[in-house]
Image: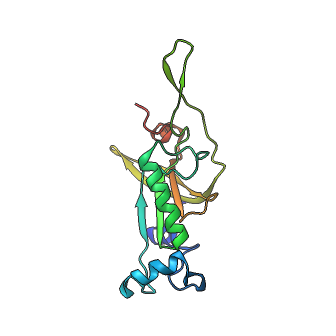
Amino acid sequence: EYASRAAFARRLASGPFSPPCSTPTARGSRRGALCRMLSPRMLSTVTPLVAYFSMEYGLHEEFHSYAGGLGILAGDFMKSAGDLGLPVVGIGLRWAQGYTVQRIGPDGYPYDEWRDYPPDALTDTGARVRVRVAAREVECMVWRVGRYAIAPLFLLEPVDERDRWITRRLYDP
């Protein structure tokens, strides 16, 4: 069953969001310093939700969804947004095999080693969305990353096995 846009937005918005400066723990903390720098308009009680889109998120070396700098930057952004309680939600792709591990073969030449990574750190939200790929709509499940202290992060993965090539490998030529 597909969620309406409004229902999907409600699902994304439910959870650990609080106005960034309204909690007692904000005072005297790193969050408190940020709150003093932000304008009152930015701190209104109706804070808009910001979606951060990235192809990769470097959250931890065991979570194989990044290749390098872009992923590390996106992961650090999600960690900071979570620490500060900012109204940010991350959107990305669930890479079944992540990024390659490069090995050196017996002949001295490098080769790529790919392996499947189970979605252990993910929870299926039950939401389904359609994403246009080329000329057709691809139905995707929405996973939520739950193992790390970050702002909410949702990863899309095609439902139909015939479409899983789209998210099988990160940056596979």
Q: Nearer the viewer, residue 28 or 45?
A: 28
Residue under the point 51% across and 54% down: 155
In which quarter of the view is residue 134 placed? top left
Q: Nearer the viewer, residue 95 or 125?
A: 95
Which residue is outermost to the right? 120
Q: Which quadrant: the C terminus?
A: top left
Residue 86 x/y as whole percent: 48, 73
Q: Nearer the viewer, residue 157 or 105?
A: 105
In which quarter of the view is residue 147 placed? bottom right
Which colouring convention does the figure follow?
Answer: rainbow
As drawn, 122 above or below 83: above
Residue 41 x/y as whole percent: 36, 86
As drawn, 115 above or below 65: above
Residue 138 visible in the displayed image: no
Residue under the point 37% across and 50% down: 132
As drawn, 138 above or below 85: above
Residue under the point 44% across and 54% down: 73
Residue 11 x/y as whole percent: 54, 69
